[in-house]
Image (tube, rainbow, N blue to C red):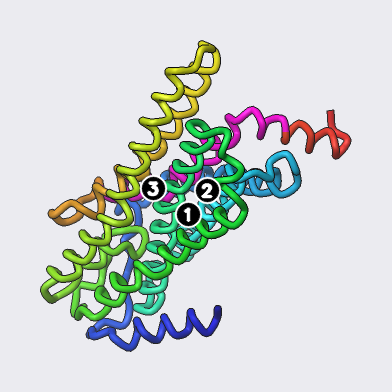
Amino acid sequence: MEATSASFIFLVTSHIKTLLTEFTLLGLSGDTKLERFILSFFALIYVITLLGNLLILCLIHLDPHLHIPMYYFLRRLALIDICYPSSTFLPLFLNYPAQRRIISLTGCAIQMYTFLVLATTECILLAVMAYDRYVAICLPLHYMMTMSNRKCVTLTLLSWVSGLVLPITHTVLAWKLPYCGPSVIDHFFCELPAVLQLACADTYLIKLVTQVGCLFTLLMPTAFIVFSYMNILVAILKTDSAKKREKAFSTCLSHLMVVVLFYGSVIYMYMKPNSLSQKDKIISTLYSILTPMLNPTIYSLRNMEVKKALVRLIRSNGLK
C-alpha cells in the first residue's frame, strides 16, 4: 500500500510544471471574526460526525443482529464519512491557531486526490446501497441469496477500486498544467475547480475529462438511485398496512433527501461551466462536512434495529 501511494505521488509530482512551489489557502472567509465563528461551528459538526459514525461502526461490529448486508454497507459508509471531513476540514482547523495556510504543491495534489477518492467511492457506494434496499423491499424472498457475502464484498471492492482509479486522470492532468501565479487558492482545501482557476494555461481538456467523469460517478449513480427508489415506492404502495407504508415512506424520503443534498451539490460544483464564486465554498461544505454528519442519523440512528442494538449494548455494559 505504501509503495502504491509513493508511486502515485511520484507520478503526480513528476508531471508538475510550475514556477510556484506552494499555495496559500484563503480559507472560509476573509473576515477573521467570521472565520473564527464558522470554524467553531464546523468543529462542532466535525465532532458530531466522528461520534455518530464511530458509534455506527461499533454497534454494527459488536451486535450480531446487525451482521446483514444492509449494515455491511452502512459500516463502509460510516468509515468514508469519518475520512471525508478529516481530509478537508481537519487540516484547516488544526492550522488555524498558527495561521499556517501554506500548502506545498505535493501536499495540495495529495489532498485533492484523497478528496476525489473518497467522494467517488461514496458516490458509487450510495448507488450500491440503493440497490441493496431495492432487493430487500422489492425482492424480499431472494434478498439473502442475491446479496450474498461474496456479492457484498465484490460491490464494496467495486466502489473502492472506482474511487482509487477514476480520480488519477483528473489529478495528473491538473498537475501537468503550469501554475505561475497568483498562488492564492480561494477555498479552504485543494479542490479541483478552485485549483484550476490558478492555471496559466488552457484547462479545456481537464474540464472535458471532468465532465465525462461526472457522467459515470454522478449522473449514472443518481439515475440508478432514482430508478431504485421509484420501484421501492411502487412496492410500498402495494402494502396493505398503512403503518408500514408510512414508515417506509419516511425512510425512503429521508434517504432521498441526503442523496439529493449530496449529489446535487457535487453536480453543481463540478459540472457548472462558470468559475467559482464565494457561495461555492458554502456548496462545498454541504458534501464535504454536512452530509457526513447527516448520514449516520438518516441511514442508521433512525432505524429501529439500530436503536435496539444500542439498548442491548448499554444493557450489556451494566447501564440502565
| Amino acid tagged 1 | Pro
Mark 1: few, some, or many residues within 10 Å (few <14, many ≥20)? many
The reply to whether dot 2 and dot 1 touch (C-beta < 8 Å) is: yes
Image quadrant occupied by the N terminus = bottom right
Mark number, residue 23: none
In the depicted structure, whether residue 140 falls above or below residue 159: above
Q: From what the image shows, is residue 314 above or below residue 91?
A: above
Instruction: Please give the range of residues in magenta.
Output: 280-308
Disc 2 or disc 3, which is closer to the eye?
A: 3
**Which residue is labeled 3 in the image?**
287
Quick check: 28 left or right of 36? Answer: left
Residue 46's disc number: 2
Q: Residue at x 34, y 48 (%)?
A: 221
Percent of width and height locating residue 23 = 31, 73
Q: Which residue is mark 1?
A: 85
**Structural distance between the alpha carbons of marks 2 and 3:** 13 Å
